[in-house]
Amino acid sequence: MKPIIFIAAIALLATAPARSQPLVDPNKVAPEYREAAEKRRAEQLRQRECALKADLEKVLPRDRTAFLNQCLDTMAAKQ
């Protein structure tokens, strides 16, 4: 039993922590993909802004998806 626990502990320590997706930098992509990268970056910024609003309003995890979808829809309607 102890070897299994030891192996499990080593496996957990050997894994890298999950990181969020970094913001797309349009200047680091090929010129033919720059327009798509700019659109993706704008979308990422909108998503981060809505996530920040959800954190500030202390939205429950079960309601977070609905809140984020509503926030993104209202931002899209404004533009």
Image: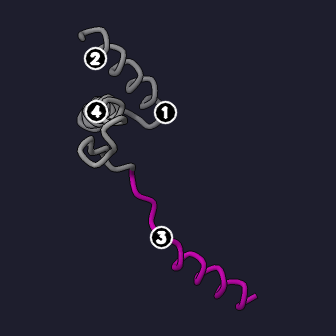
Q: Which residue is mark 1?
A: 62
Q: Position of residue 31 (x, y in %)?
A: 30, 38
Q: Position of residue 60 (x, y in %)?
A: 40, 35
Relative depth, front residue between 34 and 13: 34
Q: CA distance from mark 3 to mark 4?
A: 29 Å
Q: Tell me which secondary structure the magenta stretch mostly adopts.
A: helix
**Residue 16: which disc?**
3
Sequence-wise, the earlier of marks 2 and 1 is: 1
Sequence-wise, the earlier of marks 3 and 2 is: 3
Q: Position of residue 73 (x, y in %)?
A: 36, 15
**Residue 75: which disc?**
2
Q: Identify the secondary structure beneath mark 4.
A: helix
For residue 18: magenta?
A: yes
Q: Quadrant of residue 4?
A: bottom right
Q: Residue at coordinates 38% horizontally, 18% vertically from top-left? A: 70
| Residues rendered magenta in the picture | 1-20
The quadrant of the image that shows the C terminus is: top left
Q: Residue at coordinates 30% horizontally, 45% vertically from top-left? A: 23
